[in-house]
Image (cartoon, helix red, strand yellow):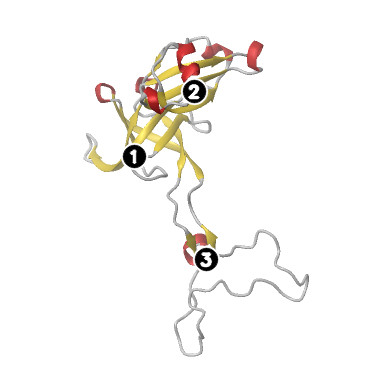
Amino acid sequence: MSVGILGKKMGMTQIFKENGERVSVTVINAGPCTVIQKKTEGTDGYNALQLGFGEKKLDKVKRPLTGHFKKANVKPSKNLKEFRLSKQESDKFNVGDEVKVTIFEKGSFVDITSKSKGRGFTGVLKRHNFGRPTMSHGTHENFRHGGSIGCATPARVIKGKKMPGHYGNAIVTIQNLEVVDVIEDKNLLLVRGAVPGSNQSMVRIRQALKKPGVKK
């Protein structure tokens, strides 16, 4: 397992490759992230790095976290996330080091985790992609309904039935997104395709688990 990075989704745009291909990309302001804490097997039972991203005023930080940042001798961060690593990868970093967008290469693949947009209470057509019945004569007031939800046996609604309810506002991971470009001087990462969440939302980026390496 390799270290990841925290970032902020800026929005979507499109770029043109050298061969003229148009590519839709998501722009992410990735890092730099500061190593706030280093966990080891001896003290915590596993190896991990706690990274901080974004600045936060000292008077806005709660007292326990104030001591946490002072112990590491770093400035307060707005977002804190932990990345589990192998011992070999963990030994490459120390508290106070910066993790930059250069840990990713152009053509590599990443997994991105973020909180999806909250859409409130929605029906089955939008929530589960159900189809709509024909709008012909004889169809009575169930154009967007889910239809039957049970029968005489077992005389109850089975758990897991797809029904209307709260949609979105959940942690979602999109796997195997291609890194189209890395702009080091501006800490920008251009990723092919869409990333969950609204603009300005925080995202968590790691090397792809299922598709590692560089695309040929």
The residues tagged by marks 1 and 3 sit, at their Cα atoms, a distance apart of 29 Å
Query: Residue at 50% across / 56% down in the picture?
Result: 167
Left or right relative to 40: residue 27:
left
Camera-near label (2 vs 1) is: 2
The relative height of residue 164 versus residue 41 in the rendered view (above or below) is: below
Query: Residue at 72% across / 75% down in the picture?
Result: 151
Query: Residue at 45% across / 32% down in the picture?
Result: 204
Give the residue at mark 1. Answer: 200
Q: Count the marks: how many?
A: 3
Instruction: Tell me the crowding category of disc 3: few under 14, some 14 to 19, or many 20 or more residues within 10 angstroms, Cα based.
Output: some
Q: Position of residue 10 (x, y in %)?
A: 30, 38
The residues tagged by marks 2 and 3 sit, at their Cα atoms, a distance apart of 45 Å
Q: Position of residue 192 (x, y in %)?
A: 35, 39
Q: Amino acid at mark 2?
A: Arg
| Labels 1 & 3 near each other (Cβ < 8 A) | no
Q: Amino acid at mark 3?
A: Val
Instruction: Tell me the crowding category of disc 1: few under 14, some 14 to 19, or many 20 or more residues within 10 angstroms, Cα based.
Output: few
The relative height of residue 122 versus residue 187 in the rendered view (above or below) is: below
Give the residue at mark 3. Answer: 124
Q: Position of residue 109 (x, y in %)?
A: 43, 31
Q: Amino acid at mark 1?
A: Gln
Give the residue at mark 2. Answer: 63
Camera-near label (2 vs 3) is: 2
Camera-near label (1 vs 3) is: 1
Q: Nearer the viewer, residue 193 or 91?
A: 91
* N-terminal label among 2 and 1: 2
Left or right relative to 141: residue 34:
left
